[in-house]
Image (cartoon, rainbow, N blue to C red):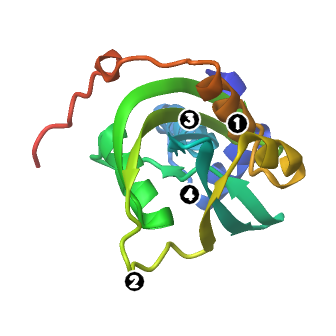
Amino acid sequence: MRGFVTQETARQFRSAAPRPKGRAAAVLFAFATESMAMTASIKVTVAAVVHRDGLFLLVEEETDDGLRLNQPAGHLEPGESLTEGVARETLEETAYRFVPQGLLGVYRWQHPTGITYVRFTFLGEATGPEPGRKLDQGIVRAVWLTPEALRAERARHRSPLVLRCVEDCLAGRRYPLELITDYPGAAA
């Protein structure tokens, strides 16, 4: 598990927390801060692939690297199932209601900053858009592109997963939603 934590990330967590007293407390402190660093460096995300009439639904979004193309996608929120998360993210980013119908795949990608993303990508249908619905901050617009147009824009993809997911969809990859088992947490 140590391989997931960069020395810099662990150092940042350790320097931000108060120092414990005693050897046992120091060991627990080291374990806890390393665990927090691990959590900070692995992100669970969900993404939607909608393929209709030869076109794919994508978003154009502002990032630190400029205007990028991505599937409707985002981070899973606490207490949310994977399918709830992808439906929410798609609605927030595109104004389309998304109904997951299958799992395209689970993808792991390490960003150049060292953050590892584990992305659950779903295939499904979208209805909409909902008129007047405001899109998430940073989202410029929802756009429908052909695979050829998306390939031509490769330099503007948010990550290599954007094209990989489209190619996997076109290749017929699809797994049943029953592959996912969701155990919700205990009620508070």
Residue picked out by circle 3: 119
The amino acid type found where label 2 is placed reads: Gly
User: From the viewer's perspective, is 137 left or right of 8?
Assistant: left
Label 4 residue SS: loop
The answer to whether mark 4 and mark 3 are in CB contact below 8 A is no
Mark 4 to mark 1 CA distance (whole Å) = 35 Å
Which residue lies most toward the front here?
Answer: 53
Q: Residues within 10 Å of mark 4 (few under 14, many from 20)?
A: few
Which residue lies most toward the bottom here?
Answer: 132
Q: Nearer the viewer, residue 37 or 168?
A: 168
Q: Quadrant of residue 15?
A: bottom right
Q: Earlier in the sequence, mark 2 or mark 4?
A: 4
Q: Quadrant of residue 2?
A: top right
Q: Where is 127 relative to 93, above or below?
A: above
Mark 1 to mark 2 CA distance (whole Å) = 30 Å
The amino acid type found where label 1 is placed reads: Leu
Residue picked out by circle 1: 161
Numbered disc in front, either 4 or 1: 1
Q: Residue at (61%, 71%) from the top-left corner? A: 141
Label 3 residue SS: strand
